[in-house]
Amino acid sequence: MPKINLGIIGGGQLGSMLSIAAKKLDIKTIVYCDDNNAPAQNFCDEFIFGRYDDKEKILEFVNKVNVITYEFENIPYETLNEINKNKPVLPKPSINRLIQHRIAEKDFINKLNIRTTQYTLVEKKSDLDSLSDLLPGILKTTTMGYDGKGQFPVKEIKDIEKMNIDFSNGYILEKLVKLKKEISVIITRFSNNNYEIYEPIENIHEDQILKYSKIPADVSKNIFNQSKEWAVSIAEELKYIGTLCVEFFIDRNENLYVNEIAPRVHNSGHLTINAYNISQFENHIRAVCSLEKIPIKKISNAKMVNLIGNQIKPYRQDMKLKDNEFFYDYQKKEIKDKRKMGHITTLIP
Ligand code: ADP
Ligand code: MG
């Protein structure tokens, strides 16, 4: 079989791990990224630096590959759609466009009769006058948010007035869920009703950034099954190809809500590298490159800790790891506050 050249848009830690998984499958990776220091250049076969609207550079990239995927959702729809006219982009650009926008995403989920938090679009200050039933809430940009960026907690309307926000950029106000727990479910879909799904992962965020993940999640049988069923419905409805993650909230009354969908591999799934025979990354590559689907098998329970900012430092200086500990350094050039620098997965009985 001729060798597959896989194009990956985005060169962060997820692009790096996709590249590593592809190598194992003897697939060549070409990463395209708008950051000249992107860490994935340390792991891929070829790296192209260019803006996401640089048509010439993108064409150069597209000419080198057979199929294209992406590691994050904030890529302009126009770019993905143009590329898709030439070579297949998976998951489909229309899926990315839907999920990029928090309102479109939540409208879609509700149409499937799946619960989300209550929400509304805020386009101008006066929209806020009638929204007291959504308080306390969180005001979020409708697009481009990640790791809690572009989010503002709101107790009272006057909190927003103080913030001096330009509402023409598009905001969503979400009612705050009284969280008991957060979980995520990762699924890789290959074709109609043909998928592999990982068990729910329990997640703890600090400052709206994922800090800890573990399996098994400490949840009821009901939540365990319901979250997986909802993830399957979402993936099937989207006719999704590749790995997708659904983030959930569980409130203090044991109600399950979908928080958001990530149309990509996900940070909470890092532990699948060590805890399963096939990781979320390898499964994504298998699905988008039309390779064989292999049934997943759990090898071990596991927990993962994200190393944020300076927390990476002691591990870089020859920290002794136990046999059941696996350290990943994303090799980002600069340590920054709130930046995910690496992680440690520990296999547990
Ligand atoms: P991002 O796109 O940055 O991941 P999320 O919407 O997932 O944004 O928010 C990040 C985290 O902030 C969530 O995982 C959760 O811990 C908290 N959060 C966000 N929205 C709500 C909400 N409506 N109610 C309670 N907690 C929330
Ligand atoms: Mg999130």
Image (cartoon, grey):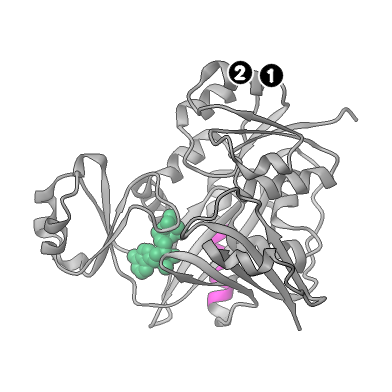
Q: Quadrant of the N terminus?
A: top right
Residue 190 shows up from this direction: no
Image coords of residue 225 (percent x, y): 58, 72
In the rendered image, the residue lying farthest to the front is 317
Instruction: Please give the label number shown on residue 31.
Output: none
Viewer-nearest residue: 212 or 67: 212
Tell me, for residue 59, which label it has, or none: 2
Question: Which stretch appears magenta?
Answer: 223-231
Circle 1 Cα neighbour tier, 10 Å, few/some/many (<14 / 14–19 / ≥20) = few
Q: Position of residue 147 (x, y in %)?
A: 45, 57
Q: Is residue 82 visible?
A: yes
Q: Which mark is on residue 63?
A: 1
Q: In what element is the residue under mark 1?
A: loop
Q: Is residue 306 above or below residue 261?
A: below
Report the quarter where the C terminus lies. bottom right
Q: Which quadrant of the structure image shows residue 29?
A: top right
Q: Residue 68 appears at what percent x and percent y?
A: 65, 32
Magenta stretch containing residue 120, yes or no?
no
Q: Residue 30 at what x, y percent from top left?
A: 71, 32
Question: Mostly what secondary structure, the magenta segment?
Answer: helix
**On the rendered structure, is 211 left or right of 171?**
right
The residue lying toward the viewer, choosing from 12 and 329, is: 329
Circle 1/circle 2 CB separation < 8 Å: yes
Determine crowd level at label 2: few under 14, some 14-19, many 20+ residues with C-alpha closer than 10 A: few
Q: Amino acid at mark 1?
A: Asn
The span from disc 1 to disc 2 (Cα, nearest Å) is: 6 Å
Q: Nearer the viewer, residue 31 or 296?
A: 31
